[in-house]
Image (spheres, grey):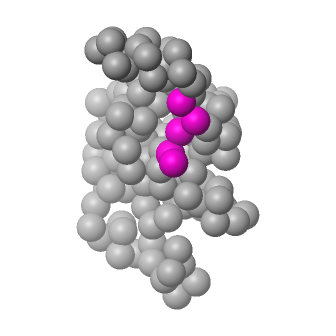
Amino acid sequence: MSLDVSPALLEQAERGEVDEAEFVDCVRTSLPFAWEMISSLVAQLKVDGGAFADNQTPPPDEQARGQLLRALASDAIRGALQRHFGVRLAFQNCHRVAVFPLDPSVDERHARFTSVRAQILNQSPELRDC
């Protein structure tokens, strides 16, 4: 299961309307490793500035890796996180998360980060089965 959905949130979804803030809180509590990773990168970007902030350290275990995959592979979760934090998220391999500001001046850097070339250059034998 990707998220620990409360009965109240499930009821909202069944009625047709879901409060996005409550959904984001569900993500925060269900995927704490992914939440902490993204929120710390957002903080780093705000402090350091620049075109983006990223993590290159693999997760400590498969549970943490799974949280990153669930958070970033789901369009709904990823979109809600991007809107909540006011950033664009990018993802390579099974752990390299990057946050980019919502600023057209970094569009080229974002395109390079998410390119096929960057994906290939980011490969390593240690990450083959991640």
Q: Is residue 84 magenta?
A: no
Residue visible at 57% across and 24% down in the picture: 6
Q: Is 77 placed above or below 84 here?
A: below
> Which stretch appears magenta?
1-5
Q: Farthest right residue? A: 60
Residue 52: x %, y % from top left? 49, 42
For residue 124, say whether it is visible: no
Horizontal and vertical percent for residue 22? Answer: 52, 16
- Total numbered labels placed on residues in the image: 0
Q: Position of residue 13 (x, y in %)?
A: 37, 20
Q: Is residue 126 left or right of residue 69?
A: right
**Foreground of the two, 39 or 14:** 14
Q: Is residue 102 visible?
A: yes
Residue at the (72%, 64%) spot, across then down:
60
Residue at image coords 35%, 75%: 120
Instruction: Place residue 122 in its image quadrant.
Output: bottom left
Q: Nearer the viewer, residue 17 or 54?
A: 17
Question: Farthest bottom residue?
Answer: 125
Q: Give the residue at x 32% y 12%.
A: 15
Q: Is residue 3 magenta?
A: yes
